[in-house]
């Protein structure tokens, strides 16, 4: 069954534009980006010896430079979406 709230990169672009991150790519200087169709979860560690709690993660949107492929991440919570797992389905098909 398909999720009733599929990932919508246009919604994400609107939210990013509201926040103002409109600078060029920090690696190559171009201004051509795309949003990956999905999100990632960045695991957090409290020490260099390994993960103390593998359940501590930051869900993030992936922004990719179309010219050089440089990747930036934007936390879902900072874009106005609740990072709670029950609402992450908004980003998954």
Image: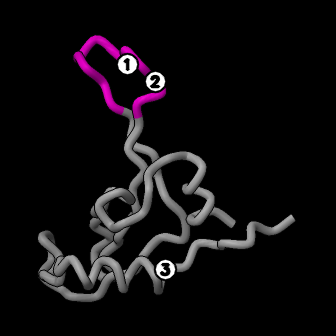
Q: Position of residue 24 (x, y in %)?
A: 14, 82
Q: Residues within 10 Å of mark 3 (few under 14, many from 20)?
A: some
The secondary element bearing badge 2 is classed as: loop
Query: Which of the 4 image quarters holds residue 67?
Result: bottom left
Q: Residue at x 37, y 14 (%)?
A: 52
Mark 3 and 1 residues: CB-CB less than 8 Å, in contact? Answer: no
Q: Residue at x 42, y 50 (%)?
A: 59
Magenta-colored span:
44-56
Q: Is residue 64 left or right of residue 55?
A: left
Task: Determine whether 8 is above or below 85 in the image.
Answer: below
Q: Residue at x 69, y 66 (%)?
A: 93
Query: Which of the 4 image quarters holds residue 22?
Result: bottom left
Secondary structure mostly seen in magenta is loop
Label number found at residue 51 = 1
- The quadrant in which the N terminus is found is bottom right
State yes or no: residue 46 in magenta.
yes
Q: Position of residue 7 (x, y in %)?
A: 58, 72
Mark 1 and 2 residues: CB-CB less than 8 Å, in contact? Answer: yes
Residue ID for mark 2: 54
Q: Residue at x 15, y 77 (%)?
A: 28
Q: Nearer the viewer, residue 23 or 12?
A: 12
Q: Position of residue 13 (x, y in %)?
A: 37, 83
Q: CA distance from mark 3 to mark 1?
A: 31 Å
Dot placed on the residue nearer the N-terminal end, 2 or 3: 3
Q: Residues within 10 Å of mark 2 (few under 14, many from 20)?
A: few
Q: How many marks?
A: 3
Q: Residues within 10 Å of mark 1 (few under 14, many from 20)?
A: few
Task: Determine whether 43 is above or below 68 in the image.
Answer: above
Residue ID for mark 3: 9
């Amino acid at each position: 069954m398909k999720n009733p709230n599929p990932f919508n990169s246009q919604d994400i672009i609107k939210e990013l534009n509201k926040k103002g991150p409109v600078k060029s790519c920090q690696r190559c200087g171009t201004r051509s980006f795309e949003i990956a169709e999905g999100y990632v979860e960045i695991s957090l560690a409290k020490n260099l010896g390994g993960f103390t709690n593998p359940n501590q993660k930051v869900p993030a949107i992936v922004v990719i430079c179309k010219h050089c492929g440089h990747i930036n991440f934007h936390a879902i919570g900072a874009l106005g979406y609740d990072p709670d797992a029950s609402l992450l389905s908004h980003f998954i098909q």
